[in-house]
Image (spheres, rainbow, N blue to C red):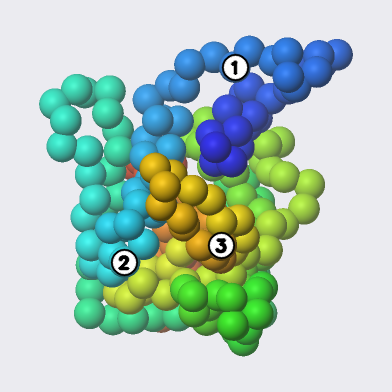
Amino acid sequence: MLMTTLILAACNGGKPKGKNIADTVYPEPNPEEVAAMKLFDVLHSSEGKNMTGAQLAVLKDTANDEEHLFCINLPVTDIDERPVADVAYTNKDTGGTLLFHYGPGLDDESIDSVGAIGTVDIRTVIHSWESADCLPDSANTRSVEARGNSIYTPYHTLYYESYEINDQTYPACWAPEYYGCLIYVYPGADSLLVTWGYEESKRVYRR
C-alpha cells in the first residue's frame, strides 16, 4: 500500500490542489507503475525475501501481454562488489543521489532479522518520465541488505501487532518493508545501476 501511494503520488499524479487526500481519486496505474508495484510485491513475498541477487537479477514477467513491462535484467557475475561508503553516487540527468554508510542498520539488531550491512540515504526519482523537478525535498534513509552478486535491497523494519485468523494466532513481529528498488554495483564500485522493475526505469549513478 505504501509503495502504491508513492507511485501514484509521484511527480505526474500528486495530490490535487485544494482537495483532501481522502477525496482524491487516483487514475488507474499505467503499465510502468504496475511493473514497479510488481517488484515491490515480489520483494515482500515469502519467496522474494529469500532470493539471492542472481535470482532477483533475472526476474521478468512471463505473460504474453505486451504491456507487461516487468523485467529486472541486471548483470549476473560472481563478483560481490560493495558500494563505496560516505561518497555520493549521483545521476547526472536528475541530480538524484545515493550515499552509503557501513555499520548498524536503522534498527536495533535484536529486532532486525534481515541483517543490515549499513544504511543508504536515497534521494531519487522512480519512473523514466520523472526529472529533477520530481526529486523529493530530502533523502530517505534505509537499511541495506546484501543479496549477493553485487545486488542490494534497501528496507526498514515495521512492527506488526499480534492478530488472529480462523482461530489461529499470529504473534507480534518485526518485518522488513522494502523500498521497492534494486541496486546493482558495477565492478570497481565507481557506479551503480538502480531499477524500479522495468527497463526504462534504470538509471546510472556515478561517484
Look at label 3 and name its amino acid. Answer: Ala
Q: Which residue is mark 1?
A: 26
Look at label 2 and name its amino acid. Answer: Asn
The quarter of the picture where the C terminus appears is bottom right
Q: Work out whether residue 200 or residue 43 is closer to the camera in this orientation and state it.
A: 43
How many numbered circles does the render carry?
A: 3
Residue appearing at x 45%, y 30% in the figure: 33
Q: Which residue is mark 2?
A: 50
Look at label 1 and name its amino acid. Answer: Tyr
Residue 131 x, y percent position in the rendering: 62, 37
How packed mark 3 is, by other alpha carbons closer than 10 Å (few <14, some 14-19, many 20 or more), is few
Circles 1 and 2, Cβ within 8 Å, touching? The answer is no
Residue appearing at x 31%, y 66% in the figure: 50
Q: Is 67 on the left-hand or right-hand side of 172?
A: left
Mark 3 and mark 1 lie on one chain; the one further toward the N terminus is 1
Q: Which residue is mark 3?
A: 172
The quarter of the picture where the N terminus appears is top right
